[in-house]
Image: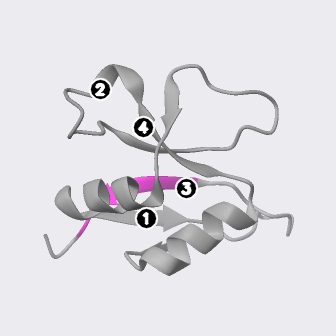
Amino acid sequence: MAKTTTDHSTIQQWVQERGGVPSTVESTTRSDSDVGLLRIDFPHGGRNDELSTISWEDFFAKFEEAQLAFLHDDETAEGDVSRFCKFIQREDA
């Protein structure tokens, strides 16, 4: 069952437990001060060349600026660890 959170420590812990890193889509970066579209990269099978790893500080600054929430699943229907996640607009924004 999908959960939604805006809590930074919960998001960072969920991502790190799954081997992910905070990233941005390089082609959407408009300047050094704009990190572009946020993504979580799970580079287990190889690196996605369109993504660039960013710091958690930059990630959460953009996350708050864009008023995003983090939608994620902890487990798959079979009970395995899930890596499903996406960013959605906050309902109260």
Q: Amino acid at mark 1?
A: Phe
Tell me whether the residue at label 4 lies in contact with that at label 3, contact meaning CB atoms closer than 8 angstroms.
Answer: no
Front: mark 4 or 3: 4
Q: Quadrant of the N terminus?
A: bottom right
Q: Does residue 14 appear to the left or right of 50 in the view shown?
A: right
**Image disc number at residue 24:** 4
Task: Return the residue at label 1.
Answer: 70
Q: Earlier in the sequence, mark 3 or mark 2?
A: 2
Residue type highlighted by circle 4: Thr
Q: Are marks 2 and 4 in contact (CB under 8 Å)?
A: yes
Sort mark 4 into few (<14), some (14-19) or many (20+) by Cα contacts within 10 Å: many
Image position, residue 4 (x, y; %): 44, 73
Along the polypeptide, which appears first: circle 4 or circle 3?
4
Q: Nearer the viewer, residue 29 or 90?
A: 29
Segment tinted magenta in the rendering: 85-90
Measured in 3D between alpha carbons, the distance from the residue under mark 2 to the one under mark 1, in whole angstroms, is: 20 Å
Instruction: Say few, some or many: other residues with alpha carbon within 10 Å of mark 2 (under 14 / 14 to 19 / 20 or more).
Output: few
Dots 3 and 2: beta carbons under 8 Å? no
Tell me if mark 3 has few (under 14), some (14-19) or many (20+) residues whose alpha carbon lies within 10 angstroms of its own. some
Amino acid carrying label 3: it is: Cys
Q: Nearer the viewer, mark 4 or mark 1?
A: 4
Inter-mark Cα distance, 3 to 1: 7 Å
Colour option used: one colour
